[in-house]
Image (tube, rainbow, N blue to C red):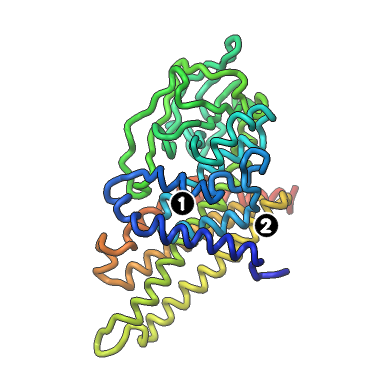
Amino acid sequence: MDFELGEEQRAIQHLAADFAAKEMAPHAAKWDAENIFPRDVVKKAAGLGFGGLYAQGEHGGSELSRLDAVLIFEQLSKACPSTAAFISIHNMATWMVDSYGDDGQRARFIPDLCSMQSIASYCLTEPSSGSDAAALRTTAVLDGGDYVLNGTKAFISGGGSNDLYVSMVRTGGEGPDGVSCIAVPKDAKGLSFGAQEKKLGWHSQPTAMVIFEDCKVPAGNLIGGEGNGFKIAMAGLDGGRLNIAACSLGSAQGCLDMAIDYLGERKQFGRRLADFQALQFRIADMATELEAARLLLYKAALKVEAKTPDATRFAAMAKRKVTDVGFDVVNQALQLHGGYGYLADYPFERHLRDLRVHQILEGTNEIMQMVVARDLLKARLG
């Protein structure tokens, strides 16, 4: 058991930190304030291999581990959690196509996905099926050489802007066994998008409904065969939960670091804030909670990489713990800055708004509790 990162992992960490500091941090406030999607910066990230982090190398993937990906998103989110999370979602969809697609599909889709010449969305949630994902209603009916899709997907990151929509649709009966996965190109006839959603945070990434109205997609775009879509979607979420947790972790660590610096600079009652024991105790607790969350996340990443029987449980545990702790630490960092923390001149309110949704997406934290409890009971009681 080794708790130290290897030389290659530290190099990956440094690469991501340098990119975040130079390409993201100087612009993140503007992206947030003006709802700018920084597609050019996202494509620059792909130039470093961040577009296909754990895709196979045959078609341009970086073939990194789940822990490597966590290290990258932890660093990117210190600058902009919203943009880091967007890149994470693209990687989740890319991995699904790379892992479950056939050779022809990988050759068609993966090179452009890895370079982010083509950017992918993950389409599972619907207006009437959020946490109950297996109850999705979007249908896909085979008609000759095409599937004809009808239905609507909700809260889709990249909706209207992205190029490929990896969508879970119903090709069979009720329940998870009737769900399949289809890659829908942006130019598919019958595909349209709702208005851009107005959100509390995540302003640097577009979000909209994805609407299928007799949308024709070639049958060759079916990923993994009929009836396997729900399994593919859940496998993708194991990695997605790790990455969204990493985005919370990095954001919170960055805010804690800034708070510690502020305590050393700010004076009240003739003393530095850093000299008040109550504030010392607060930052000690913040750091301790973050470190505990980090260790759980790294362990979960190793389990997902190794495909251990309890990998899904640990991914859910990490997602729940890290996103809760991350939000709390950012909130406390804001509090330590007093009125200044509430101003948009400082990054804390932006990080707070961005991190709030991490407790909702990739499965709400309440659903994470259900996943953990169900697996524990099954393992113990059968």
**Residue 379, position in %: x, y?**
73, 51
Distance, label 2 to label 1, CA atoms, is 21 Å
Residue 341 position (above or below residue 126)? below
Residue 190 in the image, given as x and y percentages of width and height: 43, 18
- SS under mark 2: helix
Residue identified by numbered label 1: 84
Residue with the mark numbered 2: 302
Residue at (56% x, 42% y) in the render: 92
Q: In which quarter of the image is residue 302?
A: bottom right
Q: x, y (%) of residue 83? A: 42, 49
Asked which quadrant contains residue 223, the reply is top right
Looking at the image, residue 267 sits to the left or right of residue 152; the answer is left
Q: Residue at x 50, y 34 (%)?
A: 123
**What amino acid type is highlighted by mark number 1?**
Ala
Q: In which quarter of the image is the N terminus?
A: bottom right
**At which x and y percent is residue 330?**
40, 64
Q: Is residue 172 visible?
A: no
Q: Given this view, does label 2 or label 1 mark the residue nearer the observer?
A: 1
Q: Nearer the viewer, residue 151 or 81?
A: 81
Q: Which of 186 and 135 is in front in this view?
A: 186
CA neighbours of label 2 inside 10 A, class few (<14), some (14 to 19), many (20+)? some
